[in-house]
């Protein structure tokens, strides 16, 4: 699973590690695909992060399509192999157009048929690229989604940046991943 971390053996897991694994497996994800077997070496971080992840993935107030589109922006920005591999099919199933996803992957400029898609990509891209969000983009996001959802969107972007950083630092790949969407 990782080139840099030792193999995790569940038979040797501490009580804290077992609790984290059980919470992840019994939660809405139902699997350990992603950063979890990296975080498990720090059970407190793993538990805190996975709970934040449940909120960011499922409870932001954004429709799944827009959440997954924002995750693809982060995966492309960080060239996170596993993050892209895991979330691309979810995004496509949720209605993200394949040409928009491919443009993000290739660092091109997507053509948007949906104004919400464009706004999410502009917001996430501005924050990643300039480390700020312009007044115009911020005002448009608040007008469309409200302050609470915009705060949650920033949380989602931050969480998936943590995921990307973890996956990249430890050279982690997704279960069954044989192809890489980004050059190494």
Image (cartoon, rainbow, N blue to C red):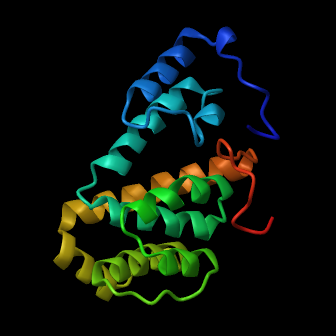
The location of residue 177, given as percent across then percent down, is: 69, 49
**Vertical placement of residue 17 versus 169, above or below:** above
Q: Residue at x 46, y 26 (%)?
A: 25
Q: Quadrant of the N terminus?
A: top right
Query: Along the line of sight, which residue is nearer the eye, 28 or 12?
Result: 28
Locate residue 98 relative to residue 145 in the image: left or right: right
Q: Residue at x 42, y 43 (%)?
A: 53
**Vertical placement of residue 167 versus 8, above or below:** below
Q: Residue at x 75, y 52 (%)?
A: 178
Q: How many marks?
A: 0
Locate residue 86 relative to residue 122 in the image: left or right: right
The location of residue 19, given as percent across then percent down, is: 48, 16
Query: Along the line of sight, which residue is nearer the eye, 165 or 172?
Result: 172
Q: Quadrant of the C terminus?
A: bottom right
**Vertical placement of residue 48 versus 64, above or below:** above
The location of residue 49, given as percent across then percent down, is: 47, 38
């Amino acid at each position: 699973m990782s080139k840099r971390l030792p193999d995790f053996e569940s038979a040797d897991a501490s009580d804290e590690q077992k609790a984290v694994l059980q919470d992840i497996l019994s939660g809405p994800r139902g699997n350990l695909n992603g950063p979890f077997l990296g975080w498990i070496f720090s059970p407190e971080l793993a538990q805190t992060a996975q709970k934040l992840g449940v909120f960011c993935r499922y409870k932001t107030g954004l429709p799944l399509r827009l959440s997954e589109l924002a995750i693809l922006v982060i995966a492309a920005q960080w060239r996170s192999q596993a993050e892209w591999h895991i979330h691309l099919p979810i995004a496509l199933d949720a209605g993200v157009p394949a040409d928009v996803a491919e443009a993000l992957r290739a660092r091109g400029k997507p053509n948007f048929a949906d104004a919400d898609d464009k706004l999410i990509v502009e917001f996430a891209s501005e924050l990643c690229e300039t480390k700020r969000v312009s007044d115009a983009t911020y005002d448009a996001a608040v007008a469309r989604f409200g302050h609470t959802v915009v705060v949650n969107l920033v949380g989602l972007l931050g969480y998936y940046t943590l995921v990307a950083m973890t996956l990249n630092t430890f050279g982690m790949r997704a279960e069954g991943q044989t192809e890489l969407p980004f050059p190494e």
